Amino acid sequence: MDKLLFKRILIAAISILAAVYVAYLLISTNFKIYPTENAVETTVTDKIYSNAFIIRDETYIYNNTSKVLSYVVNDGDEVGIKGEIAKVYDSEDDAAAQTKADALEKKLADLQNLQKTHSSSGVGIETINSEINNNIISFLGNLNEGNIISLENDTNNLLYSINQSQAYTGKISNFNSEISEIQAQINNLRGSSDKSTGVITTDKAGYFSAHCDGYENLFKYKDIDKLKLSDLNKIKKTEVSANVAGKVISSLNWYVACKISADEAINLSLWNGGVTMLFSDALTDYVPAEIYKIQQDSNKSDALLILKCSYMNEALADIRQEPIEIGLGTYKGLRVSKKAIHDDYIEKISYDNNGNQSVEKKKVQGVYVLYGSEVQFKEISIIYSGNDYVLCDESPDSDILFNGETISMYDQIILEGDDLYDGKVIE
């Protein structure tokens, strides 16, 4: 490129930039520019984060033999008084063979029942297909959550539904060969191994768990009202005896104890509803609970929060110390930055029975909204306050607002600026 041409292009570009800058200075001098933000609908849940310690009414189940156990119930299953929780075998091989034979007995019973009823069953193909879909969904859900025990039940249920579908549509006339094959496997397993030499039962009814962590007797369940925050700092697990075969969680209610701050204690003391719990390391679903007790030495000190829950499943039967997310209320409203909030006067016009007009003024909390080139002050009704924003009710009750007017969705709310007032025109 010719040097003279390059120089001319460079001079032209600099001249254009200089002209743009001068124009900007002129505009900014004569026109006031206010940063704005649209009011948009937002949903938030008020949450408290802590570390939870779970307290249940737990009783050990002992195995007073030195033999091998094969459990007949799963974690989270309900058991009755004197209910059987495990069979006793002389060896691992005997236990494995007899347990597999028991599982085959269930499959055999399903096929025999299906063979007897499929021709006379009133179940339609749509119902069967729906069951297949439900079993697949359940299988995928348990696979995603790692519920290995539930996967076996899902697999058996899915196989039954598929067999039922094939029988209904005539693809299979009978299950004679399958029944004979399974019966032969059972006979072989039963004949090549010894039967159980005894059973393990429980003296209490409740939910069973084979997992024992040594914290079962740390705090007595009946002394929950005596628990203090200082007790949580002294948690130290005990050794689980080798002859412990599991435990039974007896009472319907169980408790979650955790430390919260002084401010959180104040908020919870004012809250009169239920809460939800999410144990991030153990479950993906929220668990309902209620506030049982808040124990605090002074208004400025940390507090002990105890939550009560009556919901139980396999995962909850095994957790002990978990990070917890406590959900209070869920709020939906228009999000407004806190720096946009001001105090100003608004007017309310009313008329008496004779048609005479009266104007009343009142100082309220609100925001400045830009409508075209005009500034209007709008009162707000705050329903939730975050760190740097609030949620405002778009349709509050008529007695909450002074003159009945408030912000609406997508209003351009002025975030900051000097000399703002209602009715100001920005030129």
Image (spheres, rainbow, N blue to C red):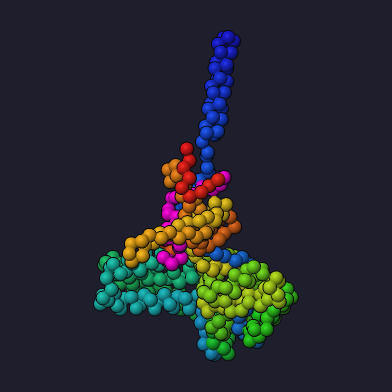
* Position in image of residue 83 (x %, y %): 53, 87
Left or right, 338 with respect to 423, comes to: right
Toward the viewer: 416 or 82?
416
Toward the viewer: 62 or 214?
214
Q: In the image, what residue occupies the spot 46% across and 42% down? A: 425
Left or right, 108 with respect to 86, comes to: left
Q: In the image, what residue occupies the spot 62% across and 71% down? A: 266
Q: In the image, what residue occupies the spot 46% across and 47% down? A: 423
Quarter assignment of residue 49: bottom right
Left or right, 177 with respect to 35, comes to: left
Image height of 101 relative to 165, above or below: below
Toward the viewer: 68 or 77?
77
* Position in image of residue 388 (x %, y %): 58, 55
Q: Main secondary structure of the magenta part?
A: loop
Residue 394 shows up from this direction: no
Q: In the image, what residue occupies the spot 64% across and 68% down? A: 263
Toward the viewer: 394 or 307?
394
Image height of 40 relative to 222, above or below: above
Q: Which residues are magenta?
A: 397-418
Is-magenta flag for residue 183?
no
